[in-house]
Amino acid sequence: MGQPSVRVTTPPLEVRRIATEVEASELAHWLLMPGRRWPVVVLTIPGEHDEPFGDPDEIKQAVGGLAEVVLMPTSDVSWAFSRTMPALTQVYGGAGRVYPVDHAWVSDPQLSRLRFAYSPHDRKRITDQLISDALQAAVAAGLVEPRTRRGAQQRSGRVQGIIGSRALVMFDDMSVATVWEELTVPGVPLDRVLAKGQQVDGSYDPDSRRLDLRAAVRFADAASARSRVQEAYQAGDVVLAQVVAVADEVVTVRLLPSLSVEIGRQAVTSNQKDTLAGLFSVGEVVACRLVAVEPLQLRLDDVDDEEVPKPPPSLLPGGPPWLRLPEPEIQSQAAAPPPSSFPKGAPPPADVVSDLPRQATPLDLAQRLSLSQPSEIARRVDATPAADQARVRQLSNELAAERATRKALAGELEGLRARAGELEAELAQATRTIEHLQTRYRGADLARQRLSKQLRSAQDRVDQAARLQGALFLDPEEQFRYEVTCEWAQRIPAAEKADKPLAKYTLAAGFLESVDQLEGISRAKVVAVVVEVLTGQAQHLPGRDAHALRTGAAGSPYVRRSDGAICWRVALQRESAAARRLHYWRTQDSYELSRVALHDDYRP
């Protein structure tokens, strides 16, 4: 059977079966031919099986005249198909895939997703996946435009229920129609568009009994979506958005299916080591702060856990909000094993990696044959010329050995299919776990950022109170020593004061002037770090980065005074422009606070 002519305007009405290598090669050329007008579903029959794991008739019934359905065995036929197809676009071994009209899948095979099936237990799953892929490809090809068809009726009804990607609608005359997810709002689950009991209006096709609701979908273009956002939200609101793309520096979210907004790293995290690609997954729903409505600006680092997002708009009148936050995942102590697609009678997965059973030798097979059919073999051997008897036995034994090997390999293949199914389930579970951990990490990072802001605010209030209160001593040095003593008294618990006393210290000439003149750091922060130095804590705090100054590059001598004191520096700030440092001299039994300086100022 050759490929259909490009002049044919509709797909074949029946499932097309590929039986020869020539037909398989022609199918490949047909898929790659410019001008193909409809998607093609190719479902393969696994080796050692007579029927596919998926249901080609159900697929054809579902897609009707929107796509072609082809069935192909896994054999030399599928090899002929694979030789003609581009790399990574082939299909065989019981798998299936949909080839869209747009040939972008030739260079990007992910656009023609390979759907796997490992046993008859996967029949419903792979069938539903291929139907969904085919319908999406038909919509993308413009084969299901929301226009009035001949015989179509404008009808209204009530949603009776939603089962997966299908919804049942009952009309007033008690007749029933079906709503398909793929033909409603692309990329949005049907339960986010419809709800049980919802009244809907659409175009009803009596032939397929399908109710098309796309003409009633709201906010289908960017202009109407932007207008709706401006009506529903105001600056400062917490809103829900869905991640549609993510890169290291930018995450793109959509407030409505036709309205996307880019959010830069600076509005997500202050941790320079984070990459946004490691924090978000495409399809994830997140809570954002709406900073501005015109132009749209969002932040992801300014949302408290207790804040309730504004309900997102519904895409159909009377429908549910089109987005919702995921339910918190309950982590059980023992993870349940992934669902197995292990075929009945197949060896357990552990056997898959074990050695194959010993292949029967010709002697073994000869003995079996002699035991099972001694008289028949004897008659045939007696009737065969003596010169050919040895050759006949050899060929018979080789044939039996090949059959035994084929049976063993078939058993191994069934085991491998079962193991592949389990690995696919484990991968899906791991992906869900990663997404859950990403959400938890973002929550923890938001809490860290909030606490940092609260700490800075508290420090500012303390500084402001100190400024309003004024100095308690006329002598600036006495005032500074008083502040250091108060910080030590408040910071060090009573039980630890004996072990962490304030060491003896002096103030170098110009130290207090450097504290007052250097901007970008509060006096309270300088006092707090001085307490850490004098109590010996700074040496053990990674954030302080305490180290002795050197006279030059690494390996050069330390900066040392004539009295033997060595100059040290500790960090007052981290990961900020021109971060401030505290310099001090460490003598044998005391400290001398030298100056407060910028990061690149290495003077003692």
Image (tube, rainbow, N blue to C red):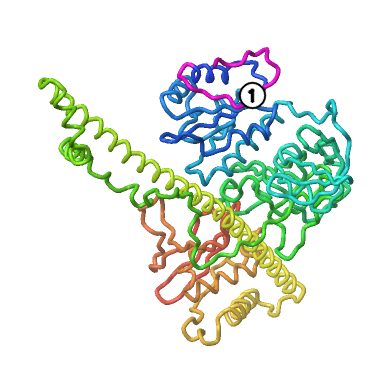
Q: Residue at x 42, y 47 (%)?
A: 419
**Relative to 396, 230 lies left or right:** right
> Would you identify the image quadrant in which residue 277 lies?
top right
Return the x and y of residue 231 as percentages of the image width and height.
89, 48
Return the x and y of residue 49 as percentages of the image width and height.
44, 36
Return the x and y of residue 148 as percentages of the image width and height.
85, 28
- Exactly how many numbered labels are in the figure? 1
Q: Is residue 179 above or below residue 509?
A: above
**Relative to 504, 488 lies left or right:** right
Q: Between residues 333 and 76, which one lies in front from this camera angle?
A: 76
Q: Residue at x 63, y 77 (%)?
A: 483
Q: Residue at x 65, y 16 (%)?
A: 35
Name which residue type carries label 1.
Asp
Q: Is residue 10 magenta?
A: yes
Q: Main secondary structure of the magenta part?
A: loop
Q: Give the residues in magenta.
A: 1-22
Q: Is residue 371 above or below residue 142?
A: below
Q: Which residue is mark 1?
A: 102
Q: Between residues 396 and 67, which one lies in front from this camera angle?
A: 396
Task: Assign a secondary structure to mark 1.
Answer: loop
Return the x and y of residue 324 as percentages of the image width and height.
73, 54
> Would you identify the image quadrant in which residue 311 lies?
bottom right
**Relative to 471, 420 lies left or right:** left
